[in-house]
Image: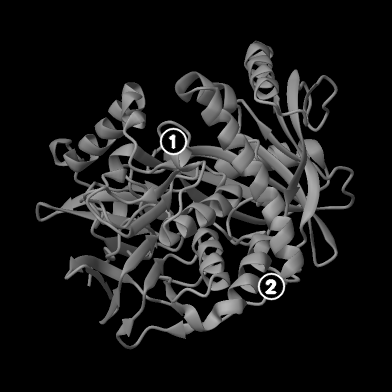
Amino acid sequence: MDINSKSIWEYNTNNNNYKTLNSDINTDICIIGGGIAGINIAYKLYKNNLNFIVLEKNKICNKTTKYSTAKITAQHGLIYYNIKQKYGLSIARKYLNSNLKSIEEYKKIISNENIDCDFETCDSIIFTQDINRKKDIENEYKCLRSIGYTSVEILDNETILPNIKYSIKFKNQAKFNPVKYTYTLSNLFNEKIYEYANVKNIKRRNNKYIIYANNNKIICNKVILCTHFPIKDIPGFYFVKMYQDTSYAIAVNIKDTDFKNVYLNLDNPTISIRTAKIDNNNILIVGGNNTKTGDTALEKKYEFLENIAKQIAPNCKILDRWSTQDCMTLDQIPYIGKFSNFMPNFYITTGFNKWGFTTSIIASNIILNKILGNKTEIDDTFFSTRVHPIKNINKLYYNINQSVQSIFLNKFKIKKEILDKIPNDTGRIIKINNKKIGIYKDINGKIFKVHPYCSHLKCVLTFNAEDKTWDCPCHGSRFDIYGNILNSPANINIHIE
């Protein structure tokens, strides 16, 4: 079976080409990162006649945005009861209302700018096949009702998969094609966008920021960091407050689509389900089965999703499969606002916890208002310099422990292996002349060598057999078999000449 390793959203879209950075630039605002967060923020700056540019390391919309399941919903798992328990009813209400407003704002932008992106209103349903999760769903429902949300109900007849015990529905949510949306929106200010602009360093001098990208300098007054995982570590220390999670997805061709809602389960492994129309074909997208990036337990990720798809559509044909990463915060709330109290006019948006579409609209509003000098009622909900997440001592210890173990993995003994004993289609770290080398041998026996240390903070990498990538268990950077960067925060390749 010929299965493409690409996203379903790559079909029937105009792959725009933008300028390449080849000279120094002076501007007021520099957005670093051309995913949906950076483009939504750029749109707000554009509509307010502000002077800005966008720098994208690769092509815009080429990472998490393109590889998402593209749900636009305020139903972010069972999150509201947890937020209420941690931060109180007011913060839970603000989190909900800001995400609901994001859905309405998408409708407005799509209508005003005449964007054809297959936007469709639907319901969002979270279900469980575990009878012991009933209390969790009831707590979530009661919390939502207590903060005034009435478009929610508990269902007892959901049949998208067998043996569903309980489910909870948010009415009037949405789904769309994120690539069509982002490309069309970015065309409004395409002269402001620079692709293949790899930012290597950011310095502050004489109350201005100097951004070093390619062989050029961008001098600006304000910086907005939208690079998914922050490419700058200090003084923000987001690498301690977040980790990256890898999810998998498949797209299958099905004859009929008898449902239009979007689904997510509460159980482990995670299952995400939605349908889409691509080139007049009915497509079922099944995602999930996620794990912390760098985890070595990666066997049969796609096979699990294929089995789920066949439960829904037994005669489906598998077309595409892909993986993506999401930045996960320790308290389930994104970081949006100031990068650090010590860096004026430097802003960040990160930690979307898999819900980047509604959150990116929230970020665009918060960041715009900060640039304009205005306060918003949700500043206290998403403020990025908060230390509350560090109070989650169990997750914090896990994050630090994972990093420390990988950084000092030299203490672990790695068996000396002879190259010809490495099986084909396998990745290993071996020692040659007392130096560690990452080796991947493809299905034909060809050898690919890399330095097996992440160029971010020198954590030892693990080989991802599903995607044929070298993954960092500390902060989620990923590299291909040649050593080229696939995902930040690393910004230097690890290939061996």
Query: How many dots with numbers?
Result: 2
Q: Quadrant of residue 226?
A: bottom left
Considering only vertical position in the picture, is 28 above or below 272? below
Q: Is residue 180 left or right of residue 242?
A: right
Considering only vertical position in the picture, is 223 above or below 136? below
State whether residue 2 appears in this view: no
Q: How is the image coloured?
A: one colour
Q: Quadrant of residue 44?
A: bottom right
Residue at 72% x, 72% y is: 12
Q: Is residue 114 left or right of residue 413?
A: right
Q: Quadrant of the C terminus?
A: bottom left
Q: Quadrant of the N terminus?
A: bottom right
In three-dimensional space, the C-alpha distance between marks 1 and 2, rounded to whole angstroms, equals 35 Å
1 or 2: tag closer to the N-terminus: 2
Residue with the most extreme front position: 374
Q: Give residue 269's position: percent from left, percent from top.
A: 58, 31
* Amino acid at circle 2: Thr
Q: Give residue 464's position: percent from left, percent from top.
A: 42, 48
Q: In the rendered structure, find residue 297 and report the number of the disc placed on it.
A: 1
* Amino acid at circle 1: Ala
State whether residue 140 appears in this view: yes
Q: Rate crowding at label 2 as few (under 14), some (14 to 19) or many (20 or more) other CA atoms within 10 Å.
A: some
Residue identified by numbered label 2: 13
Q: Give residue 243's position: percent from left, percent from top.
A: 38, 40
Cβ–Cβ under 8 Å for marks 1 and 2: no
Q: Secondary structure at mark 2?
A: loop
Q: Secondary structure at mark 1?
A: loop
Q: Rate crowding at label 1 as few (under 14), some (14 to 19) or many (20 or more) other CA atoms within 10 Å.
A: few
Q: In the rendered structure, find residue 365 and report the number of the disc placed on it.
A: none
Considering only vertical position in the picture, is 130 above or below 395? above
